[in-house]
Image (cartoon, helix red, strand yellow):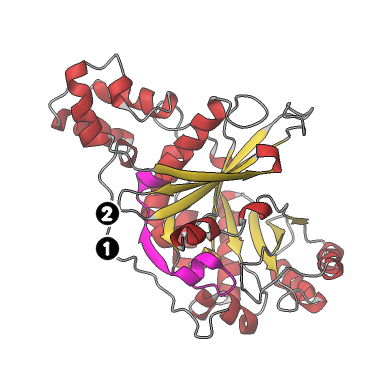
Amino acid sequence: MADVPMPLTFAAPRRGKPPRHFADLMPDERAAAVTELGLPAFRAKQLSNHYYEGLSVDPTTWTDIPAAQRESLREALFPPLLTYVRDVSCDNGATVKTLWKLHDGTLVESVLMRYGVRRDGTPGPNGVRSTLCVSSQAGCGMACPFCATGQGGLQRNLSTAEIVDQVRAACAALASGELPGGPGRLNNVVFMGMGEPMANYGSVLKSVRAITSPAPDGLGISARGVTVSTVGLVPRIEQLTTEGIPVTLAVSLHAPDDELRDTLVPINTRWKVDEVVDAAWRYAETTKRRVSIEYALIKDINDQAWRADRLANVLQARGDWGWVHVNLIPLNPTPGSKWTASRPEDEAEFVRRLEKHGVPVTVRDTRGREIDGACGQLAASESNR
Ligand code: SF4
């Protein structure tokens, strides 16, 4: 933990705005953008086909577009956004963390995880599923003391296209069979990489629309397969409740009491536990989507049995109609940090207490541990080189 707490930062520095990209545009804006370039409006549909269905980013290879127009399209609507820097993999190649450089040199990362593949790389009996964890900001302004990204501060918001293109790149990697288990599709997108998605609400929401619109208008991933996480920006949770998109909401609670949460999740000094849980409950009630409460178990900090009881009480005070599920996360310690994972016996007791109260609970698998698994660590170690 830093000796002096990091300040909370809501407004992203206004620098490094990326060039406009096709993936920033909603379907109704695409024809206008194409006609602005002096091209017939029907080209917009062809571009959608190439980008969202063909998963291609290079107009110079699109032979149904007149050769003379390809270069100007590349310049105007398909500037390179993500430049591959390197990746690190583990779990026999089924988890791949990719480090990307943005147009202004900013580094972000995304993590692709494949489930259901046997050790020999063949598909398992229950089918193969894939999840991508995306970044929504470069850095993060929420200042959680146990998190490497939070300690680095907020560099800038990502644009809609910078988020969408992380997903497109993962879809392309899966389609071309780069991961074990054979060619496949992306099933889930979780906004749990670098950044606080709700602090970049406009771009995140537009990216969710692009990710979930049926192809070729978008990437065609079911909204039910998309999870948007937050540390608890209550007004934005309330806004998401009204959007009519049935994504899963994940709230990083990490403590059931204000006293501890004020220090562990500093946004709690703005919106208290009760306000956040009320907003999450309203989200579940309105959307009929079960909310996920994320709780990183940290040794001797928030893993006491009495806090499990308290957590159960806080959640069940809003009813026990299946509106909520607790996802316990064994903390992945950051280098040089005093925050570390709970003892196995404390984790087991925490689970037992929640179950005793009838609260659905799972312990998240710790994919990516061997590859600097805590969010932001790959980018942090790269920029320290
Ligand atoms: S834990 Fe999440 S919200 Fe908190 S600082 Fe890290 S990236 Fe930001």
Left or right of 336 on screen, residue 321: right
Nearer to me, 178 or 196: 178
In the image, residue 164 above or below residue 198: above
Q: Secondary structure at mark 2?
A: loop
Which residue matches tag 1?
A: 14
Question: Picture coordinates of residue 53 (x, y %)?
Answer: 43, 25
Q: Residue at x 79, y 74 (%)?
A: 309
Residue reaching furthest front? Answer: 385
Which residue matches tag 2?
A: 17
Q: Residue at x 27, y 63 (%)?
A: 14
Q: Residues within 10 Å of mark 2 (few under 14, many from 20)?
A: few
Left or right of 336 on screen, residue 197: left
Q: Residues within 10 Å of mark 1 (few under 14, many from 20)?
A: few
Left or right of 35 on screen, residue 275: right
Which image quarter is the N terminus in? bottom right
| Segment colored magenta | 141-162
Q: Secondary structure at mark 1?
A: loop
Q: Residue at x 28, y 34 (%)?
A: 78
Residue 183 in view of the camera:
yes
In the image, residue 129 above or below residue 145: above
Q: Residue at x 50, y 71 (%)?
A: 151
Question: Picture coordinates of residue 203 (x, y %)?
Answer: 37, 51
On the image, which quarter does residue 34 sit in?
top left
Q: Amino acid at mark 1?
A: Arg
Is 153 colored magenta in this rendering?
yes
